Amino acid sequence: MVAVTRSLVQSYEYFQQNGNFVPVPVKYIVMWGRTYTRQRRARDARRAAARTSVAGEAAINAVTEAAVTTRMQDRSDGSWRFCVDYRALNELTVKDAFPIPVVDELLDELHGARFFTKLDLRSGYHQVRMRPEDVHKTAFRTHDGLYEFLVMPFGLCNAPATFQALMNDVLRAYLRRFVLVFFDDILLYSTTWADHLRHLRVVLDTLRHHRLFVKRSKCSFGVASVAYLGHVISAAGVAMDPVKVQAIHDWPRPRSARALRGFLGLAGYYRKYKSEHLHPAGLLMPLPIPTVVWADIGLNFVEALPRVNGKSVILSVVDRFSKYCHFIALGHPYTAESVAQAFFADIVRLHGVPQSIVSDRDPVFTSTFWRELMRLMGTRLHMSSAFHP
């Protein structure tokens, strides 16, 4: 650590708060919007953010025919993040297809590493200068007036791809050899301490050459364990970040389908770390044998038949206890609604509502309509396994 500290002291210019920015082109169009109102301290924070941007040469006062609105978003540390609402502009923007790295693939590169350094660029997007002819397209409104960005702001749909392309170009010679880059998060990894010092010097020199500056308070140098991209990285491997796990634990109970999907997506991200999900559940087991007629039935379609009286599809309905079968002729194409009508007319009318239905994964049976219908009927819907004949 002494050598690392000495290296950083000698290279103090890496941590300048302001400086010239890298010229990277961005193309956009702009529309009008209404300024968001919020409590007084948010307005004060917005005013301070705009003035800071002007003082730091990231924005200038503007006179333009159109602009978008701004708002302040709470940060985890209690401060404010200055956000510009570019949604209307993004709808008119041609999307950049530059590939964004896959986190799992990046983490796979860390096998065998023992020493780590994490660098975080200072306001990374703001280190990319806008083309002069595109500056007016970034115009935004505050309560104090109209401004436009001289540097690439947050909120533009192509900003992530533009910035990732820049970082890949700057550090291309070292990527996945001893450097990982995910937007403005740079991770250096080495197997020996001597190699790590050499790698650190090379990367810092490269950043200085391209006039990219890091935020020292958010960096970690020469450590054996570091938090990176929602995980804790060490020589022992990749582990869950306790902060993220606590966030899942404290997540409010979902009270809508949309909230439930959001929670499942959040919790599912760490599913691979649960040992019981890493092993096969076991051999497929047959369904239990029913004991009552027409309580458990199976559904299937027989298609591509010769057309007779406008019908070319047969819906087969089999009672799993008695093996008695109904064959219902259907027209093609059929829908979940038409299948439901035939099912009620020929099955429910004669045998009542079944307790459970076994089917394949035909789009009719996986549709929201069919699932909701089964829920209202109180019928359990069982699907055959994927790729099952």
Image: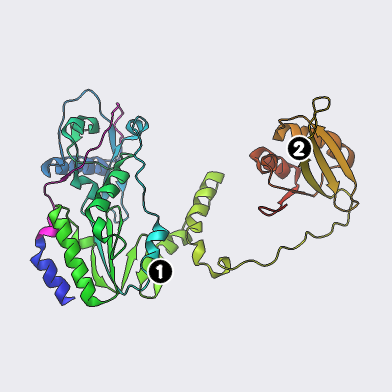
Residue under label 1:
238
Q: Which mark is residue 256?
A: none
Magenta stretch bounds: 13-37
Residue 316 % position (x, y): 82, 42
Q: Residues within 10 Å of mark 2 (few under 14, many from 20)?
A: few
Residue 291 % position (x, y): 88, 57
Q: Quadrant of residue 283?
A: bottom right
Answer yes or no: do the residues labelled 2 and 1 have beta carbons within 8 Å?
no
- Residue at position x 19%, y 38% from top? 130
Count of number-bearing discs: 2
Secondary structure predominantly adopted by residues drawn in magenta: loop
Give the quarter of the figure containing the N terminus: bottom left
- Residue at position x 39%, y 75% from top? 236
Residue under label 2:
303
Residue 298 % position (x, y): 80, 48
Magenta-colored stretch includes residue 249 = no
| Residue type of the residue flagged with mark 2 | Glu
Front position in the image: 261 or 177: 177
Label 2 or label 1, whichever comes before in sequence order: 1
- Residue at position x 29%, y 42% from top? 159
